[in-house]
């Protein structure tokens, strides 16, 4: 039987005007004639597509698929840089982070890059289920924020979303302002605002979690979003696990996340 593998897909993004990369996990059963669901898993602001290896997504998925805990699936970790997944500038550029002089902020058409380049690239390159029932998205920290706003804005594209210690800010801070030229842009992407002010499909499964010692107190935003979604009839789970805002927190909980995305008793049993 074929072994699982991780492939690196390098490509030139016409939307961003630069070379970008995606790491793609293909399970042992891949190469069969059966198309597989895809989990898009997004890194945080100082991360990269290497989150695949940094939190052992591939090895955990291998074991869980082998043990029958989750269904086989493709996992794609695209590079989204420190962008928050926003369409923040027509021209791609780097600016200084007001909150950290050693870090840069990436501005550009990152929402379009993900939706119009990454997803079609994965569907074209691999044997995927090419509809929302087989398309999941999750992310950590800033990547969790991106996963949530993408799903709530494109409910016809994704059927499951996970925000893992997602950066759900309750107000627009000074250090956020390079991303948002005004409050309209902030509200356009704020998952809490979107959920509160729009119709949300009850056919989306949502998983939220944050550590009990999270330095950003992002469990507060998770609690607010969870309440709004539950009131709208959305199947939304919300957890507070032990830990702080760190890669170790994610690593210690990744198996729970994979069970949510790849579990056997979820969306595939819905009408």
Image (tube, grey):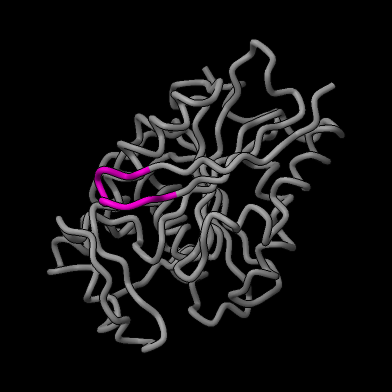
* Figure check: 155 above or below 177: above
Residue 5, position as x, y percentages in the image: 71, 37
Pick the residue in front: 257 or 177.
177
Q: Image quarter for residue 26?
A: top right
For residue 150, side relative to residue 167 (left or right):
left
User: What is the span of residues highlighted in magenta in the rendered image?
Assistant: 12-20
Examine the structure image and report whether residue 154 is included in the region drawn in magenta: no
Q: Which residue is located at x 45 percent, y 47 percent? A: 230
- As drawn, is 94 to the left or to the right of 160? left
- Which residue is rendered at x = 35% and y = 76% of the image? 104
> Observer-nearest residue: 239 or 165?
165
- Front in this rendered view, residue 65 or 199: 65
Where residue 139 sits in the image (x, y, percent)? Answer: 51, 54
Residue 185 pos. (x, y %): 17, 61
Residue placed furthest toward the top: 33
Of residue 200 and residue 42, the one placed in the foreground of this image is 42
In the image, residue 17 lies in the stretch drawn in magenta: yes
Question: Is the N terminus in the top left, top right, bottom left or bottom right quadrant?
Answer: top right
Residue 206 showing in the rendered view: no
Q: Is residue 89 above or below residue 21?
A: below
Q: How many marks?
A: 0
Residue at x 37% of width, y 50% of height: 19
- Measured along the vertical axis of the image, is residue 97 above or below residue 28? below
Kindly tell me whether residue 260 is visible in this rendering: yes
Image location (x, y in percent) of residue 155: 35, 35
The quarter of the displayed image where residue 63 is located = top right
Please say if 171 is above or below 225: below
């Amino acid at each position: 039987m074929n072994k699982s593998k991780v492939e690196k897909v390098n490509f030139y993004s016409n939307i961003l005007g630069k070379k970008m990369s995606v790491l793609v996990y293909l399970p042992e059963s891949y190469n069969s004639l059966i198309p597989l669901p895809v989990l898009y898993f997004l890194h945080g602001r100082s991360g990269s597509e290497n989150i695949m290896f940094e939190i052992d997504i591939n090895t955990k998925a291998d074991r869980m698929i082998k043990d029958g805990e989750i269904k086989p699936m493709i996992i794609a970790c695209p590079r989204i840089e420190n962008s928050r997944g926003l369409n923040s500038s027509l021209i791609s550029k780097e600016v200084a982070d007001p909150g950290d002089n050693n870090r840069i902020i990436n501005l550009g058409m990152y929402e379009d890059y993900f939706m119009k380049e990454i997803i079609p690239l994965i569907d074209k390159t691999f044997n995927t289920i090419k509809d929302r029932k087989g398309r999941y998205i999750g992310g950590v920290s800033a990547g969790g924020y991106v996963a949530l706003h993408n799903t709530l804005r494109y409910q016809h594209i994704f059927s499951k979303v996970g925000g893992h210690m997602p950066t759900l800010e309750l107000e627009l801070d000074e250090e956020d302002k390079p991303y948002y030229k005004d409050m309209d842009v902030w509200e356009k992407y704020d998952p809490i605002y979107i959920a509160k002010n729009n119709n949300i499909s009850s056919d989306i499964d949502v998983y939220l979690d944050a550590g009990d010692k999270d330095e950003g107190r992002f469990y507060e935003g998770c609690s607010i979003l969870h309440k709004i979604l539950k009131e709208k009839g959305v199947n939304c789970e919300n957890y507070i696990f032990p830990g702080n805002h760190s890669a170790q927190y994610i690593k210690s909980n990744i198996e729970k996340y994979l069970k949510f995305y790849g579990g056997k008793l979820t969306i595939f049993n819905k009408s």
